[in-house]
Image (cartoon, rainbow, N blue to C red):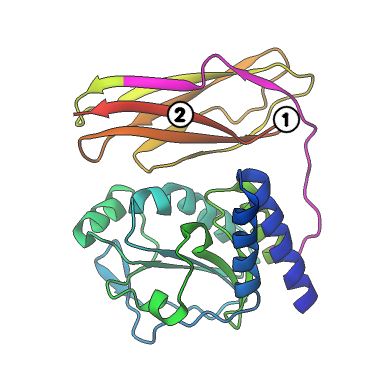
Amino acid sequence: MKNMTKFYIFIIFLFTLMFLSCSNNQRDSILSVFKEWEQREIKFPSNSIFTKLACDTVKMDIQSEFKILTYIDSVGCTSCKLQMPLWKEFIFETDSNPNNNVVFVFYICPKDKKGFEYILKRDRFDYPVCIDELDSLNILNQFSSDSRFHTFLLDKNNKVLAIGNPMHNPKIKELYLKIISGKDSFGKLPLTTISFLKNKIDLGIFSWLEKMETEIVISNTGKVPLVLNDVNTSCGCMTVEYDKKPVRPGQSTSLKIFYKAERPERFDKTLSIYCNAENAPFQLHVSGNAK
């Protein structure tokens, strides 16, 4: 198991380097994080209280063969980091498996408890969450200051098998599922090429109370069907709708993008498109001034 764990963590490291533009110093720093956490045991606070929708207290049984632990600190945008709609899809995907052997554990240390409770209810995220106002989990374990390393796949003894947020990178999600299911192979699609009518959108000036809508057209310029594996946004205030059917060579598809500001702000959000195209994932930008 020890050798397999090293393999999993090394693969996660490679995936991270594939999707991040890193200097040599950054690569060394990332590698040191993986070495530090390899097979380390995560300690859970004994007085943790889990609730649904910040109302109903529930008993959380974390005794399972696998656990996916996500810790969200108080720095920056909680909604952007957590990506609740994507977690809901992932939880549903694993729960649909009759051999489900994984528990999801969420610890949140919000800078604004009432604001976070509003987000829970807005996104209808009814999975148990521990609102850890004292940051007890972090104090016990001393997590990295880099939020990319605040999600862990753990074994039944709470030892780290892999690190990385599957909501921010489909390759990490794919790897987590591989470890959990015990399967050794990934389905690989042939690569195509794509083009964008535009890769930057400026929504201009508008009222922050208004929900904005725009779209981006993607054309398949290659010789094999284009498959959109996932489209992630940098913030929960931006959502995307798209047809998941393969796009034939020479044809196009549209991403419908919706933006609803949580407060007045000038913004520049990113949209990451994961697909079977050369040089994927692609990052697009949506900016504007919500007043």
**Which quadrant holds residue 101?**
bottom right
Q: Which residue is mark 2?
A: 285
Which mark identifies residue 278?
1
Asked whether the beta carbons under mark 1 and mark 2 sit within 8 Å of each other, the answer is no
Which label sits on residue 167? none
Give the image location of residue 15, x and y in percent: 68, 51
For the C terminus, which image quadrant? top left
- The residue shown at (60%, 45%) is 20
**Residue 188 inside the magenta-drawn segment:** yes
Residue 138 position (above or below residue 187): below
Quick one: 183 or 81, which is closer to the camera? 81
Three-letter amino acid code at the position of disc 2:
His
Say which element carries label 2. Answer: strand
- Where does the image place residue 67, in percent across and percent down from the top left? 56, 71
Work out whether 226 lies above or below 141: above
Assess whether residue 93 is covered by the magenta stretch.
no
25 w.r.t. 200: above or below: below
Residue 132 left/right relative to 271: left
Q: Hey, what amino acid is under mark 1?
A: Glu
Segment colored magenta:
181-203
Of residue 120 and residue 138, the one placed in the foreground of this image is: 138
Which residue is found at the position 80% from the left and 32% from the top?
Answer: 190
Q: Quadrant of the N terminus?
A: bottom right
Determine which quarter of the picture holds residue 64: bottom right
Q: Which residue corresponds to the image point at 39% horizontal and 48% vertical from the top-left?
A: 80
